[in-house]
Amino acid sequence: MTVLKRLSIVGAGSLISFYGWSQLGLGVAFYANHYSQTIYSAGVVAAGGLLALCGLVPNSLVVWLIKLQTPAAKRRDAKARHGSAGERMQKRTEPLQGRHEES
């Protein structure tokens, strides 16, 4: 992600957060948007702050988090690649079962 794109994300988050703070400063705790949904000013501040922080996360950290796997995820991936123990045993015994039927 380019520096300009990161700065625009941080700027958009700051602008959204500033809008929420201005609404709180005017004494507006919540209001209804054009879909008649209730929007809380504190939630707008939090969403803007989260967006600004997301723009500051470096790409290397995101790549590291994607590659990071829990032990349960590693077992699940290994099972998907190699099949479960029961499936492996069934593959081993299928040729033997065919020989017993012939005799």
Image (tube, rainbow, N blue to C red):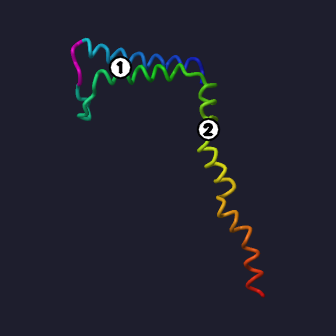
Question: Is residue 29 magenta-colored?
Answer: yes
Q: Amino acid at mark 2?
A: Gln
What amino acid is at disc 1?
A: Val
Question: Looking at the picture, does residue 65 appear above or below residue 96?
Answer: above
From the viewer's side, name the closer residue of 58 and 4. 58
Q: Residue at x 60, y 31 (%)?
A: 65
Q: Quadrant of the N terminus?
A: top right
**Circle 2 crowding by C-alpha within 10 Å: few under 14, some 14–19, many from 20:** few
**Disc 2 element:** loop
Tell me which residue sits at (60%, 44%) in the image.
Answer: 73
Residue 87: in magenta span: no
Q: Quadrant of residue 74?
A: top right
65 is higher (above) or lower (below) than 73: above
Where are the magenta residues, as a range? 26-30
Of helix, strand and loop, which one carries label 1? helix
State left or right for residue 38 relative to residue 7.
left
Quadrant, the C terminus: bottom right
Magenta region's main secondary structure? loop
Callout 2 touching callout 1 (CB < 8 Å): no
| Percent x, y of residue 96 | 76, 76
Residue behind mark 2: 69
